[in-house]
Image: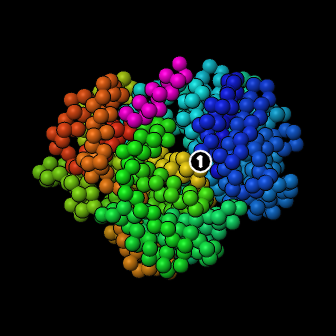
């Protein structure tokens, strides 16, 4: 795993670039310069350690910088008769590009962002993997083009300005929507997309080369039993590839759920000395005892990492600042801690990411499997709204009442608002307190929602399609990439392999949610591999007691940031509303209030510790 950067018509300083990318690649740094073009690479050596140095060249024509791993690259070398001078997947990309051109992207099973410069055409080709597991951001303005693996790297070298209009999206989604960022003229390269840059004119063209929506539209006719057999086979292939594509030891995260449990059970068959890691911090959110059952069943070299959060006050600003943009997902905190602890043992780690979005793991999917709430129905909307209005607010996240209360909440809404309420549900119901925007900040989302809502898919396929394109891309994959790479560690996700991404969306929704049971297909497979105590447990993950934090350990620091002079939120939210929210004077469910305050806190930490601090340094 690595960090990459580059530019056209903009001179960069190696010191500034590598200072921000060193954690992504502490082992080796390199650069390439030709006329108005520069490439930079910071390497975490995992595969072909001795001869995988980058930037890498081929035939004095092609030059590449690459972040990621291609797990089937040896298979592709054999299949296409490719011969190189190294065993590196980086060289495989160059050989494939030379032979097949852009079409080779569809062959790759991996997580990747790479930039290839062709000296003969004087063009740069930049491509990102199907789901967007590896990040890339780029600045484009005034005939200048600059790209980097992280926003903090761009912020270090460019005098970037805040793009205020995008912060309304942040308050609704908890992230910036798809390609948007907190900065003007800076975009994120979207999943399954490539760029072509003409280095003579510095014109760019963007093309979508892969789209999960097309696979939701193309339904498989496989029976449940046939699908179960295929999923078992694909999981074995995917885990095996991700274990073998490394010259370093590969471990596995265990959260106590079936996703990481299945990955571990399969990985143990190929690695008898497998190291596993879970976190333990007591209370209702501690699932370490369930993880221990899997570790004991498969006799893994298990490490239980006890986290007390005693240093949370000292660490929280640094952890949030790593993201380079406001980031609301509070599970980033335990993800960072467990990665940091696991790095003491291994540099490569398997995880269960993507299984919930592909196989139907969230409780909110259950009602959508029974009824398409995205369809307009005034009667259901009216009855839900009246019922909710007379009920007391829910304050316990894991309670059945909370589930019912949230069901009423989104059922009482219309169309596109339903998805936001059923999902992140941060400021839904309180947008009347937003400052008046001078633009339609939801326009991009509404177009995407209408495209999926009008496609003829079932209710469950619609919400899962939306989650893949929005929640997985903007939140889950970002969280794990930054949490691991901040600790110079590589995370690998077997459920995100090419075969799963192109097969699971084609399966009927009934294979994913049956009655009240989520992840039906995976739970059935789990009966073959996991202790029975795990199979029918609700969704697990690195969750934290956010409500307790907001009212306890972090109460003072949150109040300090949110009550500071000239906070950023005043541009988007009524100050009196936020004051009452902070003083707990607004009727709102306790968990929702905690999410609101955490979202504001994360934004203010970014504003003060990242934007203002770097702005002063650049000036």
Q: Looking at the picture, how far across and down is residue 235, in whole percent?
A: 58, 69
The quadrant where residue 49 appears? bottom right
Query: Is the residue 232 above or below the residue 323 in the image?
Result: below
* Magenta region: 604-619
Colour mapping: rainbow
Query: Is the residue 22 above or below the residue 348 in the image?
Result: above
User: Which residue is located at x 49 percent, y 22 percent?
Assistant: 616
Q: Looking at the picture, how far across and down is residue 352, in whole percent?
A: 51, 62
Query: Which residue matches tag 1?
Result: 134
Residues 611 and 452: in front is 611
Q: How many marks?
A: 1
Sort mark 1 into few (<14), some (14-19) or many (20+) by Cα contacts within 10 Å: many
Horizontally, is 156 left or right of 555 in the view? right
User: Which residue is located at x 38 percent, y 78 percent?
Assistant: 533
Per the image, is 611 magenta?
yes
Q: Looking at the picture, how far across and down is residue 129, in whole percent?
A: 62, 49
Per the image, is 120 magenta?
no
Horizontally, is 96 left or right of 202 in the view? right
Q: Main secondary structure of the magenta part?
A: helix
Q: Looking at the picture, how far across and down is residue 95, in whole percent?
A: 81, 50
User: Which residue is located at x 36 percent, y 71 percent?
Assistant: 537
């Amino acid at each position: 795993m690595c960090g990459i950067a580059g530019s056209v018509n903009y001179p960069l300083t190696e010191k500034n670039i590598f200072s921000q990318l060193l954690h992504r690649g502490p082992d080796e740094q390199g650069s390439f310069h030709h006329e108005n073009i520069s490439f930079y690479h910071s390497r975490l050596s995992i595969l072909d350690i001795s001869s995988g140095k980058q930037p890498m060249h081929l035939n004095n024509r092609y030059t590449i910088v690459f972040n990621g791993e291609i797990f089937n690259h040896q298979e592709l070398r054999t299949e296409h008769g490719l011969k190189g001078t190294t065993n590196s997947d980086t060289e495989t990309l160059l050989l494939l590009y030379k032979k097949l051109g852009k079409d080779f992207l569809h062959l790759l099973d991996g997580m990747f962002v790479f930039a290839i410069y062709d000296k003969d055409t004087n063009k740069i080709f930049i491509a990102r993997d199907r789901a967007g597991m590896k990040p890339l951001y780029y600045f484009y303005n005034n005939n200048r083009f600059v790209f980097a693996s992280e926003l903090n790297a761009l912020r270090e070298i460019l005098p970037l300005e805040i793009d205020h209009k995008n912060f309304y999206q942040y308050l609704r989604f908890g992230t910036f929507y798809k390609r948007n960022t907190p900065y003007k003229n800076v975009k994120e390269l979207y999943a399954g997309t490539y760029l072509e840059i003409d280095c003579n004119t510095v014109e760019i063209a963007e093309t979508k080369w892969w789209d999960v929506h097309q696979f939701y539209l193309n339904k498989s006719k496989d029976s449940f039993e046939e699908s179960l057999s295929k999923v078992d086979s694909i999981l074995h292939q995917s885990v095996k590839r991700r274990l073998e594509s490394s010259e370093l030891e590969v471990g596995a995260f265990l959260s106590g759920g079936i996703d990481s449990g299945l990955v571990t059970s399969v990985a143990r068959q190929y690695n008898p000395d497998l190291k596993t890691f879970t976190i333990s911090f007591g209370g209702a959110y501690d699932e370490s005892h369930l993880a221990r059952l899997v570790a004991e069943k498969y006799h893994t070299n298990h490490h239980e990492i006890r986290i007390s959060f005693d240093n949370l006050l000292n660490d929280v600003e640094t952890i949030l600042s790593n993201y380079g943009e406001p980031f609301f997902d509070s599970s980033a905190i335990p993800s960072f801690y467990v990665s940091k602890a696991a790095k003491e043992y291994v540099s490569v780690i398997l995880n269960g990411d993507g299984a919930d979005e592909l196989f139907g793991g969230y409780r909110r999917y259950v009602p959508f499997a029974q009824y398409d709430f995205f369809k307009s129905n005034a009667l259901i909307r009216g009855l839900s709204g009246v019922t909710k209005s007379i009920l007391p607010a829910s304050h316990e996240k894991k309670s059945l009442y909370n589930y019912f209360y949230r069901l009423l909440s989104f059922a009482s809404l219309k169309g596109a608002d339903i998805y936001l309420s059923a999902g992140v549900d941060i400021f839904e119901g309180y947008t009347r307190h937003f400052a008046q925007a001078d633009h339609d900040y939801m326009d991009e989302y509404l177009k995407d929602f209408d495209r999926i809502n009008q496609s003829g898919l079932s209710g469950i396929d619609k919400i899962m399609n939306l989650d893949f394109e929005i929640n997985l891309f903007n939140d889950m994959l970002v969280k794990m990439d930054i949490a691991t790479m901040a600790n110079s560690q590589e995370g690998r996700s077997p459920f995100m392999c090419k075969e799963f991404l192109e097969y699971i969306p084609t399966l009927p929704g009934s294979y994913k949610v049956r009655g009240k049971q989520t992840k039906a297909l995976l739970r059935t497979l789990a009966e073959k591999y996991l202790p029975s105590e795990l199979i029918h447990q609700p969704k697990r993950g690195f969750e934290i007691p956010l409500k307790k934090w907001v009212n306890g350990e972090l109460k003072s620091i949150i109040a300090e940031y949110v009550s500071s002079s000239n906070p950023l939120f005043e541009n988007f939210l009524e100050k009196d509303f936020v004051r009452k929210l902070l003083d707990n004077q607004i009727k709102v469910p306790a968990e929702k209030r905690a999410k609101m305050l955490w979202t504001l806190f994360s934004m203010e930490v970014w504003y003060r510790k990242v934007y203002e601090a770097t702005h002063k340094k650049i000036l």
